[in-house]
Each structure stands twice: as C-alpha cells, then as structure tokens.
Amino acid sequence: MNILTEIAQIYATLTSMIIAGVLNMIFVKLPICKALKKPMDCGKCLHDGKRLFGENKTWKGFFGMIILGGGSQVLWGAVCSAFPILEAQNQLIAVHGNSFSLNLNIGLFFGFAYAIFELPNSFIKRRLGIMSGKTDKGFKGALFYVVDQIDSLLGVVLCLSMLCHISFLQYWLYILVGFFTHSAVNLILYALRIRRNI
C-alpha cells in the first residue's frame, strides 16, 4: 500500500472528528446552553495556587464534543454510504460495517476520547504557568504548539487502534497527518475569527 492510499484511508476514516471539532468550537461560542459554560475545574486551584485546567475547559465543550462526535460520525457514515469510493477507504466501515447505531456509538466514544485527552495538556500547561488560550515562546512554546495539535488525536487514534487493530506505524502516520490537518484547520478558523489564536 502506498503513502497516498494510506493518507486517503486516514481522511476517509477520521473526517468525522475534524467536522466534530470545528462544530464544537462554534457551539462553545454560541449563546446557548449557558448553564454548561462553566469550567470543569469549578475554578479550583491546587496547592501551587494555579488552576487545575483553566477557564477554557468547560462542561459545554466537553459534552458538546461527545454529542457532536456522535452526530458527525453518523453523518459521515451516510456520506460514505452515498460514495462507495469513500466507504471502501474507511477502515472502521471495513471492519465493523456502516450502520446508524454503530456509527453513533463509535462517534460518542471518539468524542469522549477527544475531550478527555485534551485535559492532561491543559493540566501541565497550568502547572508551567501558561495561561488558558495562550502560547509561550522558545522551545516550550514550540513543544506545546505540537502537543496542542495532537493531544486529542492521540486519544481518538488510540480508540481506533482498539477497534481496527492498526499497526504502530499506521498509528503514528495518523498522528502526523492529523498534526498538519489540525494546523491547517486552525489557520482557517483563525482567519474566519472563530479561533482567537493559532
């Protein structure tokens, strides 16, 4: 299998999570479900005087990602069903088939993993004094730029590997392609003023 085929499989398999991530970013900014727009750490600080996760990790974003993950996976499953060339490249469909209930459960599972795997990164950044939604300079800034692009993806691809038994090399190819895709999407969202920073 050549690299272009591998990349086609990656996009055919995980485009739903790209869609869910973008939709969730928009959802968090909309003036709805205000009761959920509360920090997951409830404003608590640890013994170091710094927040656990910070203001940007809210219950609205957490539950939004799970629900939109389920919805996006169902929608993407329908798109793949309409276009056999996509369905043939989708690794999840190749192993598990393409049904509403299966897509919904997988999407909810992926959405949960996406949201959970963002939290350790936020926890570490607060310990290092990097404020919510901010970046740093030098090596630390470059390192966390990379981590910011792949933290959620590490969880999603881990779940995918449980469902499809992808190889170690495939796992890291998913992460690499995801890094560049996430960076490109962030640039577009920044240009559209949906994101406050790159």
Image: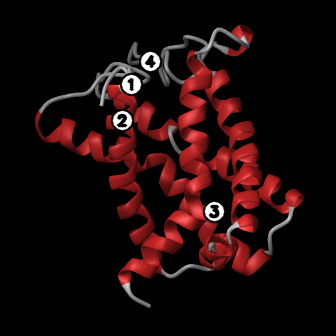
Residue at 35% from the left image edge and 31% from the top image edge: 125
Name the residue tied to disc 1: 192
Q: Secondary structure at mark 1?
A: loop
| Image-based side of 141 in relation to 90, left or right | left
How far apart marks 1 and 3 lie (CA) works out to: 31 Å
Nearer the observer: mark 1 or 3; the answer is 1
Name the residue tied to disc 2: 188
Name the residue tied to disc 3: 159
Name the residue tied to disc 4: 47
Residue at 65% from the left image edge and 31% from the top image edge: 62
How far apart marks 1 and 4 lie (CA) works out to: 39 Å
Q: Position of residue 25 (x, y in %)?
A: 54, 28
Q: Position of residue 173 (x, y in %)?
A: 39, 71
Residue at 28% from the left image edge and 40% from the top image edge: 144
Closer to us: 79 or 38: 79
Closer to us: 196 or 147: 196
Amino acid type indicated by mark 1: Leu
Label 1: how many residues lie within 10 Å, few (<14), some (14-19) or many (20+)? few
